[in-house]
Image (spheres, helix red, strand yellow):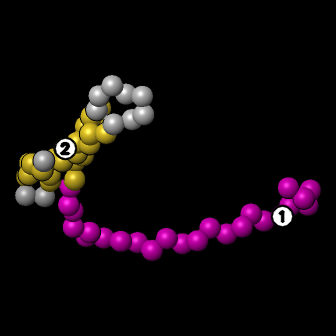
């Protein structure tokens, strides 16, 4: 099931039924997810880190 909670947000319910070995009946798992859409308005490139400088003591 999918519920739209706002123009950019959804609530999703996932249900799975399964039968494991040794079970006398099926089991059901229910998961809930919230999905939100957003517009990227700013991005800054990540600057790679420099390796640590060696000291006189070798640390």
Residue 20 numbered mark, or none? none
Residue found at x 78% / y 65%: 53
Judging from the image, what secondary structure is the residue with disc 1 in? loop
Q: Position of residue 10 (x, y in %)?
A: 14, 52
Residue found at x 86% / y 61%: 55
Question: Where is residue 14, by image quadrant?
Answer: top left
The residue pinned by badge 2 equals: 13
The alpha-carbon separation of the residues under discs 2 and 1 comes to 54 Å
- Numbered marks: total: 2
Magenta segment: 36-59
> Relative to 1, is 23 above or below?
above
Q: Position of residue 54 (x, y in %)?
A: 83, 64
The residue pinned by badge 1 equals: 54
> Relative to 58, is 26 above or below?
above
Magenta-drawn stretch contains 50: yes
* Image side of residue 33 versus residue 10, left or right: right
């Amino acid at each position: 099931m999918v519920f739209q909670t706002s123009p950019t947000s959804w609530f999703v319910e996932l249900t799975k039924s399964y039968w494991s070995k040794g079970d006398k009946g099926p089991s059901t798992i229910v998961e809930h997810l919230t999905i939100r859409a957003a517009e990227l308005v700013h991005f800054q490139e990540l600057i790679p880190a420099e390796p640590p400088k060696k000291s006189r003591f070798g640390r």
